[in-house]
């Protein structure tokens, strides 16, 4: 039963391949990718080989079980059976495709030949003509529906419908969830889980421009005392949510949920004064840590309200 | 009456055959290299001339026009002589045709890696080569029609109908799609812009598939299949019906490449319905072929050429069913721009064109060398590895296409895109890309084995360069001829046949193209859309040179998943100064139509220098040569004058001051980059391309649609 196991194994490997591509916590992503590729190749090749081996094995087993004569007998039986079946099948196929039996072919052979090639005067198969008529009917119907009766929606209308439906669904979902937070209700927190969530988003989305430790690269340094767009938690939230078009800061409104923006804003605030290596020179105006002055306790109490 | 004695020209057939095999191997090898570049960008050998955007068109041109093109001429020159019972009209024209065609291909091999391209897919070659193509095509036409005129066979056989349709339609397509205004020896601008240019291009692109990859091959199938199987063609009536239906309907279907773009809705719908109506006429060819094999299926088991034919016809049937399904807009919404399309075209190209070509080569080479095939075993190996290669190619690509298409459309319950980062979806399908390159390598291996097999066959035989034949000269027309059915009468009037085919293909052409090209209300204008600045124009030409549109589209479809990801969907009026349009047809990377202002200049600088700096894991090649190469500003004046001729409203005399404007804008960008500690001279190419990228899609933010 080895081949069957192999087949199962190969399917298993195939289905988990995407996971290889995604998660590389132990090995580097690239190495995992290569292992994934290798596994897929190997599995496919094994599958082909296994099928071939099974086929050969069946032949050998049949020979051993039936003996050489038995095999021959079976074969003869099979041939006879096959011929009968074949004739029956041919007739069925002829009927299905409205074909003339081959034996009557001479009556419809067109006399002329081109470099030895002859043609038969078969009618176009009926089912073929039906297929053609059905597609033509579809075509006429389609044009009527979309352009005469105006039943079908053309792309602009279709888009408006799609957006309206999405807005409804979104509103319904948000009404039920605790996800509602905006620049007016966002609260500062040092809650570890919030900061951890914020950090992972930061690494994924922000680090490319602001540096892994917020030291600034293309984007400004986020750890010093200088701020371009305000240093209050609500300011940071707003900057992330709407972006700063002119300076190349993208808007994240449509890519991060309000909760995620709040997390990452808090993480940014937590970076203040962390003095990372290679800091970018200060940009903007020096600001006092105004809403950070609230005591930790107070902040925690506020957070509880935000998160829950 | 004595029969005429004459000789068939086999040498020209042999020459086209050799060219087919050599270009086939080269074209497929380039294909393999670009396929590997899609997961290993370093495979561009850190060289601009071998980078994806420039060599992907080389792959498509080489396999379509070099491999398939030469195979068509091989098949036509062999079968036409025998069907007309006449030698080719002129040996000199045959030679000019052969060497002219090879010259075109060689010039493609030189110019495409240099980045000399019109950016029109499958018509990338620049205007001097376009003219050469026209001349060689006319030579081919004269040679073919000369042969038909001096024929010794009264009626022309169905294979030749297809050859005639091929000749006349390709001529029309090539000329209309190449209407361009030269602004330099190897630079031109398309006369049409935006939506109009897109419509012309896909009318061409779709029908290049129809009349270069389909009709000549159907013609060859009608000659070689009955020859190989020694069976009569199943139905003459079906031949007539599917020939006329096919060429009439095919020409309308082009707009299905532009669904959900800014092409007017009525044109899109015509594209959809004619694609659906195309199923039966396309299948007509497959049915007539497969039913011709009735009573010969036992031969298929032993004869490798017939095996190739059967798989080829089946692949044709699959591809011509899938095509119409993909043009239904609900399916298209998922499949378009993804690897699904790549899988679809390769089932057609590898299965139908490739396998039919191999079958014909295996059948024909031993015959003109008066010998047997060197190794049947090797041919059989070729068949199996080729078939497996197609499966290993197509299945992963379908898988990748579905996966990415669906991932890009997925939303979270919060109403956010589940995969806001395009790159995430790309990374997910990379293993599939690895597998398809394995499939491609298998297919190529088969072709190399075939080349060796055919070489050995040729060596063991001797070419019959001039094959003796005899046939009765055409007798006076039988008085009974007047009572023939109408189509039978048409079959003995080749010039009338040519005109009839021309009229049939022009009907769809006119009805679809004319309104969009002439009625201005089909393209609502937008007041705030202004011509490109000289620097942006130069940057745009760099974008074309590097072939960015091979991987990045510039058209946002009206879907929630696209407007959330990319911004406001595209409006027809935004493209009115786009000579040529750059909508692209594949999103290996994200859409760029609203790229302007999304990131800072320094982001673009770093990203072009090495995309992995800004997007870890990206498969985009590094474009570091843009940083070192100086922008050629000597062409600015000519380009502005060219655009003015095409109706782009630059003020009079602007060409004289264009370079001053260009310098000013470039300095601004260089200064802005300097603020981020990036030192770059303002005269480098990268500045121009950044200027263009930052302009993309920003115009409508400045004002509202005039004609909503």
Image (cartoon, rainbow, N blue to C red):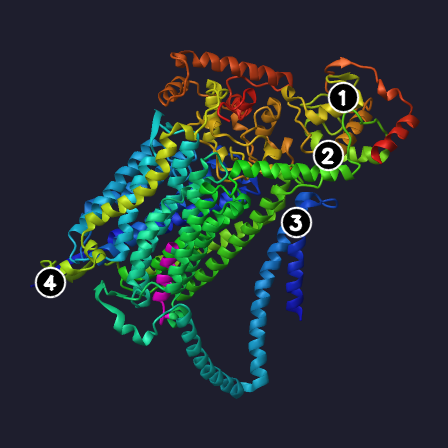
Element at badge 1?
A: helix
Circle nearer the N terminus (1, 2) = 1
Task: Name the disc covering residue A235, or none.
Answer: 1
Sequence-wise first label, 1 or 3: 3
Residue A28, by quadrant, is: top right
Please, is residue B315 above or below residue B674 in the view? below
**Residue highlighted by disc 3:** A18
What element does badge 3 sit on? helix
Q: Which mark is residue B261?
A: none
Q: How far is disc 1 from disc 2 in space, using C-alphas?
A: 17 Å
Q: Please state the chain letter of the residue tagged with numbered disc 3 in the rendered image.
A: A
Q: Find out whether residue A267 is within the magenta segment.
A: no
Magenta span dominant secondary structure = helix
Chain where mark 1 sits: A
Tell me the distance, in whole angstroms, between the alpha carbons under discs 3 and 4.
70 Å
Give the percent coordinates (x, y) of residue A266.
Answer: 80, 28
Q: Residue at x 75, y 37 (%)?
A: A174
**Category of crowding for the residue at label 2, using alpha-carbon neighbours closer than 10 angstroms: few (below 14), some (14–19), many (at least 20):** many
Q: Secondary structure at mark 4?
A: loop
Q: Is residue B297 above or below residue A132?
A: below
- What is the magenta range? B281-296
Discs 3 and 4 carry the same chain letter:
no
Instruction: Give the letter of the chain under mark 4.
Output: B
Mark 2 lies on residue: A257
| Distance Cα–Cα, label 2 vs label 4 | 86 Å
Q: Out of B413 and A192, give the one closest to the viewer.
A: B413
Residue at the spot of label 4: B3
Q: Residue at x 48, y 34 (%)?
A: B262
Q: Would residue B123 appear left or right of B52 to someone viewing this image?
A: left
């Amino acid at each position: 039963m080895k081949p069957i196991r192999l087949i199962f194994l190969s399917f298993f490997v195939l289905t988990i391949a995407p996971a290889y591509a995604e998660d590389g916590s132990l090995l580097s992503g690239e190495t995992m990718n290569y292992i994934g590729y290798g596994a897929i190749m190997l599995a496919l090749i094994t599958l082909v080989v296994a099928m071939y081996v099974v086929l050969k094995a069946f032949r050998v087993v049949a020979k051993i079980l039936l003996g050489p004569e038995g095999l021959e007998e079976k074969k003869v039986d099979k041939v006879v059976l096959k011929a009968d079946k074949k004739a029956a099948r041919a007739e069925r196929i002829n009927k299905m495709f409205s074909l003339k039996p081959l034996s009557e072919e001479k009556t419809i052979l067109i006399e002329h030949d081109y470099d030895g090639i002859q043609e038969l005067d078969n009618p176009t198969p009926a089912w073929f003509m039906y297929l053609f008529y059905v597609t033509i009917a579809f075509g006429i119907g389609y044009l009527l529906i979309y352009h005469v009766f105006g039943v079908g929606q053309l792309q602009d209308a279709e888009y408006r419908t799609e957006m309206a439906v999405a807005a409804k669904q979104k509103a319904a979902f948000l009404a039920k969830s605790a996800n509602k937070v905006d620049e007016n209700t966002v609260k500062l927190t040092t809650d570890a889980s919030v900061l951890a969530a914020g950090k992972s988003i930061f690494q994924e989305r922000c680090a490319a421009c602001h540096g892994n430790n917020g030291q600034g690269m293309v984007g400004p340094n986020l750890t010093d005392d200088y701020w371009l767009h305000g240093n209050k938690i609500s300011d940071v939230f707003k900057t992330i949510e709407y972006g700063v078009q002119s300076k190349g800061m993208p808007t994240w409104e449509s890519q991060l949920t309000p909760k995620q923006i709040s997390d990452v804003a808090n993480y940014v605030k937590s970076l203040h004064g962390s003095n990372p290596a290679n800091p970018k020179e200060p940009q903007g105006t020096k600001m006092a840590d105004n809403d950070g002055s609230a005591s930790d306790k107070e902040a925690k109490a506020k957070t509880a309200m935000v998160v829950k | 009456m004595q029969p005429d004695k004459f000789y068939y020209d086999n040498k020209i057939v042999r020459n086209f055959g050799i060219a087919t095999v050599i270009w086939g191997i080269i074209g497929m090898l380039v294909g393999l290299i670009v396929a590997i570049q899609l997961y290993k960008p370093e495979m561009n050998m850190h060289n601009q001339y071998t980078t994806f955007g420039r060599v992907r068109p080389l792959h498509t041109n080489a396999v379509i026009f070099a491999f398939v093109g030469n195979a068509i001429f091989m098949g036509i020159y062999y079968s036409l002589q025998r069907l007309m019972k006449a030698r080719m009209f002129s040996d000199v024209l045959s030679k000019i045709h052969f060497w002219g065609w090879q010259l075109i291909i060689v010039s493609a091999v030189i110019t495409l890696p240099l980045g000399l391209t019109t950016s029109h897919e499958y018509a990338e070659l620049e205007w001097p080569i376009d003219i050469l193509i026209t001349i060689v095509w006319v030579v081919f036409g004269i040679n073919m029609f000369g042969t038909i005129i001096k024929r010794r066979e009264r009626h022309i056989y169905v294979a030749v109908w297809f050859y005639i349709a091929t000749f006349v339609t390709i001529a029309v397509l090539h000329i209309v799609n190449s209407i361009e205004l030269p602004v330099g020896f190897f630079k031109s601008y398309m006369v049409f812009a935006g939506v109009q240019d897109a419509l012309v291009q896909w009318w061409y692109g779709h029908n290049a598939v129809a009349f270069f990859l389909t009709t000549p091959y159907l013609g060859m199938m009608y000659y070689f299949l009955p020859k190989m199987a020694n069976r009569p063609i199943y139905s003459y009536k079906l031949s007539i019906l599917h020939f006329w239906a096919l060429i009439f309907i095919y020409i309308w279907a082009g707009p299905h490449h532009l669904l959900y773009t800014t092409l007017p809705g009525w044109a899109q719908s015509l594209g959809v319905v004619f694609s659906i109506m195309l199923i039966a006429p396309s299948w007509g060819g497959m049915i007539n072929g497969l039913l011709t094999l009735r009573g010969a299926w036992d031969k298929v088991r032993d004869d490798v050429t017939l095996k190739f034919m059967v798989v080829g016809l089946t692949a044709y049937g699959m591809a011509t069913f899938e095509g119409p399904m993909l043009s239904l807009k609900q399916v298209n919404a998922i499949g378009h721009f993804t690897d699904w399309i790549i899988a679809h075209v390769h089932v057609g190209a590898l299965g139908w064109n490739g396998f039919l070509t191999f079958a014909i080569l295996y059948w024909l080479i031993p015959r003109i060398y008066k010998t047997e095939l060197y190794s049947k075993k090797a041919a059989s190996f070729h068949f199996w590895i080729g078939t497996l290669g197609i499966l290993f190619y197509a299945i992963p690509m379908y898988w990748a296409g579905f996966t990415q298409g669906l991932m890009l459309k997925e939303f979270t319950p919060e109403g956010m895109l589940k995969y806001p980062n395009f790159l995430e979806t790309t990374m997910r399908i990379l293993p599939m890309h690895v597998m398809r390159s394995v499939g491609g390598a298998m297919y190529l291996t088969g072709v190399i084995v075939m080349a060796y097999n055919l070489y050995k066959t040729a060596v063991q035989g001797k070419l019959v360069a001039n094959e003796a034949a005899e046939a009765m000269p055409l007798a006076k027309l039988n008085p009974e001829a007047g009572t023939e059915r109408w189509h039978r009468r048409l079959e003995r009037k080749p010039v009338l046949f040519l005109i009839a085919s021309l009229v049939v293909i022009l009907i769809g052409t006119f009805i679809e193209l004319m309104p969009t090209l002439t009625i201005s209300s089909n393209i609502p204008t937008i007041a705030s859309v202004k011509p490109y600045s000289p620097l942006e124009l130069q940057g745009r030409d760099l974008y074309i040179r590097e072939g960015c549109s091979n991987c990045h589209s510039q058209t946002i479809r009206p879907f929630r998943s696209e407007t959330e990801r990319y911004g406001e969907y595209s409006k027809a009026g935004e493209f009115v100064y786009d000579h040529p349009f750059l909508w692209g047809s594949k999103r290996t990377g994200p859409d760029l139509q609203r790229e302007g202002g999304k990131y800072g200049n320094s982001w673009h600088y770093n990203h072009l220098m090495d995309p992995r700096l800004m997007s870890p894991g990206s498969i985009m090649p590094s474009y570091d040569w843009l940083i070192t190469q100086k922008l050629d500003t000597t062409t600015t004046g000519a380009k502005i004058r060219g655009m003015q001729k095409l109706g782009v409203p630059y003020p009079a005399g602007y060409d004289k001051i264009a370079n001053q404007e260009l310098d000013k804008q470039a300095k601004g960008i260089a200064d802005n980059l300097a603020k981020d500690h990036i030192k770059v001279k303002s005269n480098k190419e990268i500045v121009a391309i950044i200027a263009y990228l930052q302009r993309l899609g920003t115009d409508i933010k400045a004002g509202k649609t005039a004609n909503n």
